[in-house]
Image: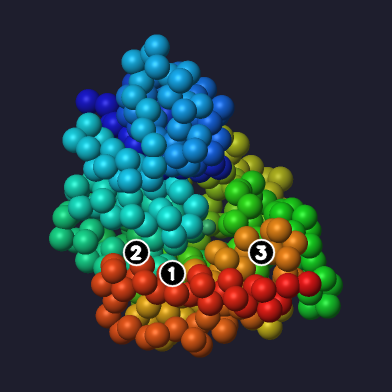
Amino acid sequence: MKRRIAILGSTGSIGTQTLDVVRQHPDLFEVETIVANNSTDVLIAQAREFRVGNVVVCNKDRYREVADVMQPEDIKVWAGIESAGALAAASNVDIVVAAMVGFSGLRPVVEAIRAGKIIALANKETLVAAGAPVMALSRQHQAPILPVDSEHSAIFQCLLAAQGNAVARLHLTASGGPFRCWSREKIAAATAADALKHPNWNMGAKITIDSATMVNKGFEVIEAKWLFDMEPDRINVVVHPESVVHSMVEFEDGAVIAQLGCPDMRQPIQFALSFPDRLTLNNKKLDFATLGSLSFEAPDMERFPGLRLAYEAIGHGGNVPCAMNAADEVAVAAFLRGEIGFYDIPSIISDCIAGVNFVADPSLDDIFDTDAEAKARASELVRKHSR
Ligand code: MG
Protein backbone atom coordinates (compact mmCIF):
# COMPACT_ATOMS: atom_id res chain seq x y z
CA MET A 1 0.00 0.00 0.00
CA LYS A 2 1.35 3.40 -0.96
CA ARG A 3 1.36 6.10 1.69
CA ARG A 4 -0.98 8.84 0.52
CA ILE A 5 0.26 12.36 1.20
CA ALA A 6 -1.25 15.82 1.49
CA ILE A 7 1.28 18.66 1.27
CA LEU A 8 0.25 21.94 2.89
CA GLY A 9 2.62 24.43 1.26
CA SER A 10 3.69 22.37 -1.77
CA THR A 11 5.36 25.22 -3.69
CA GLY A 12 7.70 26.35 -0.89
CA SER A 13 11.14 25.03 -0.03
CA ILE A 14 9.95 22.07 2.08
CA GLY A 15 7.05 21.33 -0.27
CA THR A 16 9.18 21.08 -3.41
CA GLN A 17 11.76 18.94 -1.60
CA THR A 18 8.96 16.67 -0.34
CA LEU A 19 7.90 16.19 -3.96
CA ASP A 20 11.49 15.35 -4.86
CA VAL A 21 11.42 12.57 -2.25
CA VAL A 22 8.17 11.28 -3.76
CA ARG A 23 9.73 11.47 -7.23
CA GLN A 24 12.49 9.13 -6.03
CA HIS A 25 10.06 6.62 -4.52
CA PRO A 26 6.93 6.59 -6.67
CA ASP A 27 6.30 2.99 -5.63
CA LEU A 28 5.97 4.00 -1.96
CA PHE A 29 4.30 7.41 -1.96
CA GLU A 30 1.40 9.02 -3.73
CA VAL A 31 0.47 12.70 -3.57
CA GLU A 32 -3.24 13.11 -3.02
CA THR A 33 -3.54 16.83 -2.24
CA ILE A 34 -1.35 19.87 -2.73
CA VAL A 35 -1.95 23.30 -1.21
CA ALA A 36 -0.35 26.67 -1.89
CA ASN A 37 -1.17 30.35 -1.51
CA ASN A 38 -0.10 32.14 -4.67
CA SER A 39 2.40 30.22 -6.80
CA THR A 40 -0.22 29.03 -9.27
CA ASP A 41 2.14 28.17 -12.16
CA VAL A 42 4.19 25.87 -9.94
CA LEU A 43 1.02 24.41 -8.45
CA ILE A 44 -0.37 23.57 -11.88
CA ALA A 45 2.89 21.92 -12.95
CA GLN A 46 3.00 19.88 -9.72
CA ALA A 47 -0.64 18.81 -10.12
CA ARG A 48 0.08 17.48 -13.59
CA GLU A 49 3.36 15.77 -12.80
CA PHE A 50 2.05 13.93 -9.72
CA ARG A 51 -1.51 13.39 -11.03
CA VAL A 52 -2.88 14.63 -7.68
CA GLY A 53 -6.55 14.31 -6.79
CA ASN A 54 -6.95 17.77 -5.29
CA VAL A 55 -5.37 21.18 -5.56
CA VAL A 56 -6.10 23.98 -3.07
CA VAL A 57 -5.39 27.62 -3.87
CA CYS A 58 -5.56 29.43 -0.53
CA ASN A 59 -5.69 32.87 -2.11
CA LYS A 60 -9.28 32.89 -3.37
CA ASP A 61 -8.49 35.67 -5.87
CA ARG A 62 -6.20 33.29 -7.73
CA TYR A 63 -8.45 30.22 -7.68
CA ARG A 64 -9.74 30.74 -11.24
CA GLU A 65 -6.23 30.77 -12.72
CA VAL A 66 -5.80 27.17 -11.60
CA ALA A 67 -9.40 25.99 -11.91
CA ASP A 68 -9.68 27.04 -15.57
CA VAL A 69 -6.52 25.20 -16.55
CA MET A 70 -7.33 22.05 -14.56
CA GLN A 71 -10.94 21.77 -15.68
CA PRO A 72 -10.37 19.37 -18.61
CA GLU A 73 -8.21 17.15 -16.41
CA ASP A 74 -9.45 14.89 -13.65
CA ILE A 75 -8.09 17.13 -10.87
CA LYS A 76 -10.37 18.93 -8.42
CA VAL A 77 -9.49 22.52 -7.55
CA TRP A 78 -10.58 24.20 -4.32
CA ALA A 79 -10.32 27.74 -2.97
CA GLY A 80 -9.38 28.93 0.51
CA ILE A 81 -7.45 27.60 3.48
CA GLU A 82 -10.66 26.03 4.90
CA SER A 83 -10.51 23.52 2.04
CA ALA A 84 -6.89 22.72 2.96
CA GLY A 85 -7.93 21.58 6.44
CA ALA A 86 -10.88 19.55 5.17
CA LEU A 87 -8.81 17.77 2.50
CA ALA A 88 -5.93 17.10 4.91
CA ALA A 89 -8.46 15.42 7.20
CA ALA A 90 -10.06 13.39 4.37
CA SER A 91 -10.05 9.59 4.42
CA ASN A 92 -7.82 9.28 1.32
CA VAL A 93 -4.83 10.82 3.14
CA ASP A 94 -2.40 9.00 5.48
CA ILE A 95 0.32 11.63 6.05
CA VAL A 96 0.02 15.41 6.13
CA VAL A 97 3.20 17.36 5.44
CA ALA A 98 2.63 20.64 7.30
CA ALA A 99 4.91 23.04 5.46
CA MET A 100 2.94 26.27 5.37
CA VAL A 101 4.72 29.34 6.67
CA GLY A 102 3.59 30.89 9.93
CA PHE A 103 0.60 30.80 12.23
CA SER A 104 -1.81 30.30 9.31
CA GLY A 105 -0.63 26.67 9.22
CA LEU A 106 -2.17 25.96 12.63
CA ARG A 107 -5.84 25.49 11.67
CA PRO A 108 -5.37 22.87 8.92
CA VAL A 109 -2.85 20.98 11.09
CA VAL A 110 -5.38 20.86 13.93
CA GLU A 111 -8.02 19.47 11.56
CA ALA A 112 -5.60 16.79 10.35
CA ILE A 113 -4.72 15.86 13.95
CA ARG A 114 -8.41 15.57 14.85
CA ALA A 115 -8.74 13.12 11.94
CA GLY A 116 -5.86 11.01 13.35
CA LYS A 117 -3.41 11.64 10.50
CA ILE A 118 0.36 11.25 10.77
CA ILE A 119 1.71 14.80 10.81
CA ALA A 120 5.12 15.45 9.25
CA LEU A 121 5.66 18.81 10.88
CA ALA A 122 7.77 21.49 9.25
CA ASN A 123 5.54 24.36 10.41
CA LYS A 124 7.17 24.99 13.81
CA GLU A 125 4.83 27.91 14.50
CA THR A 126 2.13 25.32 15.23
CA LEU A 127 4.01 24.16 18.32
CA VAL A 128 5.50 27.54 19.22
CA ALA A 129 2.09 29.20 19.34
CA ALA A 130 -0.07 26.30 20.49
CA GLY A 131 2.22 23.61 21.90
CA ALA A 132 0.07 22.50 24.84
CA PRO A 133 -3.31 22.21 23.07
CA VAL A 134 -1.77 20.71 19.92
CA MET A 135 0.16 18.02 21.84
CA ALA A 136 -2.97 17.22 23.88
CA LEU A 137 -4.96 16.76 20.65
CA SER A 138 -2.19 14.63 19.16
CA ARG A 139 -2.39 12.26 22.15
CA GLN A 140 -6.18 12.26 22.21
CA HIS A 141 -6.51 11.41 18.52
CA GLN A 142 -3.41 9.21 18.30
CA ALA A 143 -2.06 11.42 15.54
CA PRO A 144 1.74 11.21 15.79
CA ILE A 145 3.69 14.40 15.10
CA LEU A 146 6.96 13.53 13.35
CA PRO A 147 9.53 16.31 13.05
CA VAL A 148 10.74 17.58 9.69
CA ASP A 149 12.83 20.42 11.10
CA SER A 150 16.40 19.12 10.68
CA GLU A 151 17.40 19.58 14.34
CA HIS A 152 14.29 17.86 15.66
CA SER A 153 14.55 15.07 13.13
CA ALA A 154 18.15 14.61 14.31
CA ILE A 155 17.01 14.37 17.93
CA PHE A 156 14.18 12.03 16.94
CA GLN A 157 16.74 9.81 15.16
CA CYS A 158 19.16 9.93 18.13
CA LEU A 159 16.35 9.06 20.55
CA LEU A 160 15.87 5.75 18.75
CA ALA A 161 19.04 4.78 20.64
CA ALA A 162 17.50 5.66 24.03
CA GLN A 163 15.73 2.30 24.50
CA GLY A 164 13.61 3.83 27.27
CA ASN A 165 16.56 5.36 29.14
CA ALA A 166 16.23 8.88 30.53
CA VAL A 167 17.64 11.79 28.53
CA ALA A 168 19.79 14.32 30.38
CA ARG A 169 19.97 17.10 27.79
CA LEU A 170 19.24 17.94 24.19
CA HIS A 171 21.86 19.88 22.22
CA LEU A 172 20.35 21.85 19.35
CA THR A 173 22.91 22.98 16.82
CA ALA A 174 22.66 26.36 15.10
CA SER A 175 24.59 27.54 12.06
CA GLY A 176 24.80 31.01 13.58
CA GLY A 177 23.36 32.52 10.40
CA PRO A 178 24.89 35.13 8.10
CA PHE A 179 25.79 37.57 10.93
CA ARG A 180 27.65 35.15 13.18
CA CYS A 181 30.92 37.08 12.83
CA TRP A 182 29.44 40.56 12.46
CA SER A 183 29.73 43.25 15.16
CA ARG A 184 26.59 44.52 16.86
CA GLU A 185 26.95 47.87 15.01
CA LYS A 186 27.21 46.21 11.64
CA ILE A 187 24.24 43.91 12.39
CA ALA A 188 22.18 46.94 13.44
CA ALA A 189 22.57 48.38 9.94
CA ALA A 190 21.91 45.07 8.13
CA THR A 191 19.36 45.03 5.31
CA ALA A 192 16.95 42.28 4.29
CA ALA A 193 19.29 41.40 1.40
CA ASP A 194 22.18 40.88 3.86
CA ALA A 195 20.04 38.68 6.08
CA LEU A 196 18.77 36.59 3.18
CA LYS A 197 22.26 35.24 2.44
CA HIS A 198 22.19 32.13 4.62
CA PRO A 199 25.54 30.28 4.59
CA ASN A 200 24.36 26.64 4.62
CA TRP A 201 20.63 26.21 4.14
CA ASN A 202 18.52 27.37 1.24
CA MET A 203 15.14 28.23 2.78
CA GLY A 204 12.19 30.60 2.46
CA ALA A 205 12.50 34.31 3.33
CA LYS A 206 10.71 34.24 6.70
CA ILE A 207 12.78 31.41 8.18
CA THR A 208 16.00 32.87 6.75
CA ILE A 209 15.40 36.16 8.58
CA ASP A 210 14.45 34.15 11.69
CA SER A 211 17.80 32.37 11.38
CA ALA A 212 19.66 35.67 11.15
CA THR A 213 17.98 36.95 14.37
CA MET A 214 18.24 33.46 15.97
CA VAL A 215 14.52 33.71 16.70
CA ASN A 216 14.33 30.53 14.62
CA LYS A 217 16.65 28.74 17.04
CA GLY A 218 14.59 30.06 19.94
CA PHE A 219 11.44 28.71 18.31
CA GLU A 220 13.22 25.39 17.88
CA VAL A 221 13.89 25.28 21.64
CA ILE A 222 10.15 25.71 22.19
CA GLU A 223 9.36 23.14 19.50
CA ALA A 224 11.77 20.67 21.15
CA LYS A 225 10.15 21.22 24.55
CA TRP A 226 6.80 20.08 23.17
CA LEU A 227 7.97 17.33 20.81
CA PHE A 228 10.25 15.65 23.33
CA ASP A 229 8.61 16.71 26.62
CA MET A 230 11.84 18.32 27.81
CA GLU A 231 12.17 21.33 30.11
CA PRO A 232 13.83 24.31 28.35
CA ASP A 233 16.69 24.47 30.88
CA ARG A 234 17.74 21.05 29.60
CA ILE A 235 17.71 22.20 25.98
CA ASN A 236 21.10 23.64 25.10
CA VAL A 237 21.84 25.60 21.94
CA VAL A 238 25.33 25.35 20.48
CA VAL A 239 26.55 27.23 17.42
CA HIS A 240 28.05 24.88 14.85
CA PRO A 241 28.85 26.82 11.66
CA GLU A 242 29.45 23.78 9.43
CA SER A 243 25.86 22.45 9.89
CA VAL A 244 27.06 18.86 9.72
CA VAL A 245 25.97 17.76 13.21
CA HIS A 246 22.22 18.34 13.02
CA SER A 247 21.66 17.95 16.78
CA MET A 248 22.52 15.66 19.70
CA VAL A 249 21.06 13.81 22.65
CA GLU A 250 23.00 13.47 25.91
CA PHE A 251 22.19 10.63 28.28
CA GLU A 252 22.65 10.51 32.06
CA ASP A 253 25.99 8.71 31.78
CA GLY A 254 27.40 11.56 29.67
CA ALA A 255 27.21 9.63 26.40
CA VAL A 256 26.18 11.87 23.52
CA ILE A 257 24.55 10.52 20.37
CA ALA A 258 24.70 12.84 17.36
CA GLN A 259 23.11 12.71 13.94
CA LEU A 260 25.31 13.93 11.09
CA GLY A 261 24.91 14.47 7.39
CA CYS A 262 25.38 16.99 4.61
CA PRO A 263 22.83 19.80 4.99
CA ASP A 264 19.91 18.60 2.85
CA MET A 265 16.33 18.83 4.06
CA ARG A 266 15.27 15.86 1.96
CA GLN A 267 16.80 13.49 4.53
CA PRO A 268 14.59 14.60 7.47
CA ILE A 269 11.58 14.94 5.13
CA GLN A 270 12.06 11.43 3.81
CA PHE A 271 12.58 9.96 7.27
CA ALA A 272 9.29 11.48 8.44
CA LEU A 273 7.51 10.01 5.42
CA SER A 274 9.09 6.55 5.61
CA PHE A 275 9.45 6.15 9.40
CA PRO A 276 10.39 3.71 10.83
CA ASP A 277 12.08 2.58 7.60
CA ARG A 278 15.09 4.22 5.97
CA LEU A 279 15.11 4.51 2.20
CA THR A 280 17.82 5.28 -0.31
CA LEU A 281 18.28 8.96 -1.14
CA ASN A 282 20.38 10.45 -3.95
CA ASN A 283 21.88 13.14 -1.72
CA LYS A 284 25.48 14.12 -1.14
CA LYS A 285 27.12 11.83 1.43
CA LEU A 286 29.58 12.98 4.08
CA ASP A 287 33.24 12.49 3.23
CA PHE A 288 35.03 12.47 6.57
CA ALA A 289 38.48 12.45 4.98
CA THR A 290 37.90 15.87 3.41
CA LEU A 291 35.54 17.25 6.06
CA GLY A 292 38.36 18.65 8.19
CA SER A 293 37.34 20.00 11.59
CA LEU A 294 33.93 20.61 13.08
CA SER A 295 33.67 23.62 15.38
CA PHE A 296 31.31 24.55 18.18
CA GLU A 297 30.79 27.73 20.21
CA ALA A 298 28.27 29.22 22.63
CA PRO A 299 25.59 31.46 21.12
CA ASP A 300 25.91 35.21 21.77
CA MET A 301 22.59 36.26 23.28
CA GLU A 302 23.61 39.93 23.31
CA ARG A 303 24.10 40.23 19.57
CA PHE A 304 21.24 37.77 18.97
CA PRO A 305 18.56 38.58 21.56
CA GLY A 306 15.97 36.50 19.66
CA LEU A 307 17.22 33.34 21.33
CA ARG A 308 17.09 34.87 24.83
CA LEU A 309 13.56 36.15 24.17
CA ALA A 310 12.38 32.66 23.24
CA TYR A 311 13.75 31.19 26.50
CA GLU A 312 12.00 34.05 28.30
CA ALA A 313 8.71 33.41 26.46
CA ILE A 314 8.67 29.67 27.16
CA GLY A 315 9.73 30.41 30.75
CA HIS A 316 6.53 32.47 31.18
CA GLY A 317 4.62 29.75 29.33
CA GLY A 318 0.89 29.95 28.61
CA ASN A 319 0.09 32.16 25.62
CA VAL A 320 3.37 34.14 25.76
CA PRO A 321 5.18 32.11 23.05
CA CYS A 322 2.12 32.64 20.84
CA ALA A 323 2.50 36.41 21.30
CA MET A 324 6.19 36.14 20.49
CA ASN A 325 5.44 34.26 17.28
CA ALA A 326 2.79 36.78 16.24
CA ALA A 327 5.09 39.74 16.92
CA ASP A 328 7.88 38.07 14.97
CA GLU A 329 5.68 37.43 11.92
CA VAL A 330 4.65 41.09 11.77
CA ALA A 331 8.15 42.43 12.47
CA VAL A 332 9.89 40.15 9.94
CA ALA A 333 7.39 41.12 7.22
CA ALA A 334 8.09 44.80 7.97
CA PHE A 335 11.85 44.19 7.93
CA LEU A 336 11.58 42.42 4.55
CA ARG A 337 9.70 45.48 3.22
CA GLY A 338 12.55 47.66 4.46
CA GLU A 339 10.36 49.52 6.97
CA ILE A 340 12.23 48.72 10.17
CA GLY A 341 15.80 47.92 11.22
CA PHE A 342 17.19 44.52 12.18
CA TYR A 343 17.18 45.11 15.95
CA ASP A 344 13.62 46.49 15.77
CA ILE A 345 12.56 42.84 15.34
CA PRO A 346 13.64 41.71 18.84
CA SER A 347 12.55 45.04 20.27
CA ILE A 348 8.99 44.61 18.93
CA ILE A 349 8.93 40.99 20.15
CA SER A 350 10.06 42.08 23.60
CA ASP A 351 7.31 44.74 23.84
CA CYS A 352 4.66 42.26 22.69
CA ILE A 353 5.79 39.65 25.23
CA ALA A 354 5.56 42.26 27.97
CA GLY A 355 2.12 43.45 26.85
CA VAL A 356 0.35 40.11 26.49
CA ASN A 357 -2.90 39.43 28.38
CA PHE A 358 -1.54 36.39 30.14
CA VAL A 359 -3.47 33.11 29.91
CA ALA A 360 -1.76 30.29 31.83
CA ASP A 361 -3.52 27.36 30.20
CA PRO A 362 -4.73 28.62 26.82
CA SER A 363 -7.34 26.83 24.70
CA LEU A 364 -7.05 26.98 20.92
CA ASP A 365 -9.56 29.86 20.94
CA ASP A 366 -7.33 31.75 23.40
CA ILE A 367 -4.41 31.13 21.05
CA PHE A 368 -6.27 32.63 18.08
CA ASP A 369 -7.24 35.66 20.24
CA THR A 370 -3.66 36.12 21.44
CA ASP A 371 -2.32 35.90 17.89
CA ALA A 372 -4.72 38.61 16.68
CA GLU A 373 -4.06 40.90 19.68
CA ALA A 374 -0.28 40.55 19.47
CA LYS A 375 -0.30 41.13 15.71
CA ALA A 376 -2.33 44.33 16.17
CA ARG A 377 0.09 45.52 18.82
CA ALA A 378 3.12 44.59 16.72
CA SER A 379 1.69 46.48 13.73
CA GLU A 380 1.38 49.60 15.88
CA LEU A 381 4.98 49.14 17.03
CA VAL A 382 6.12 48.75 13.41
CA ARG A 383 4.59 52.17 12.63
CA LYS A 384 6.45 53.65 15.60
CA HIS A 385 9.77 52.15 14.54
CA SER A 386 9.31 52.90 10.82
CA ARG A 387 12.15 54.77 9.26
MG1 MG B 1 15.84 23.97 11.85
Query: Label 1 amino acid?
Result: Ala
Foreground residue, 116 or 54?
54
Give the number of the disc on residue 227: 2
Left or right? Give the position of 304 relative to 222. Answer: right
Q: What distance separates the C-alpha of mark 3 from that of mark 1? A: 17 Å
Does mark 2's beta carbon lie closer than 8 Å to ligand 1? no
Residue designated by label 1 = 372
Q: Earlier in the sequence, mark 1 or mark 2?
A: 2
Does mark 1's beta carbon lie closer than 8 Å to ligand 1? no
Give the number of the disc on residue 271: none
User: Regarding mark 1 in the picture, which secondary structure is present there?
Assistant: helix
Which residue is drawn at the image coordinates 40% and 17% (left, top)?
71
Foreground residue, 219 or 368?
368
Q: Residues within 10 Å of mark 3 (few under 14, many from 20)?
A: many
Position of residue 261 measured from the top left corner of the image (x, y, whole percent): 55, 47
Residue 82 visible to the viewer: yes
Query: Label 2 amino acid?
Result: Leu
Q: Foreground mark, 1 or 2?
A: 1
Position of residue 108 measured from the top left corner of the image (x, y, whole percent): 33, 50
Position of residue 247 measured from the top left corner of the image (x, y, whole percent): 50, 61
Give the number of the disc on residue 334: 3
Quadrant where the N terminus sits is top left
Check the image and report above or below for 27 versus 126.
Answer: above
Check the image and report above or below for 186 versus 7.
Answer: below
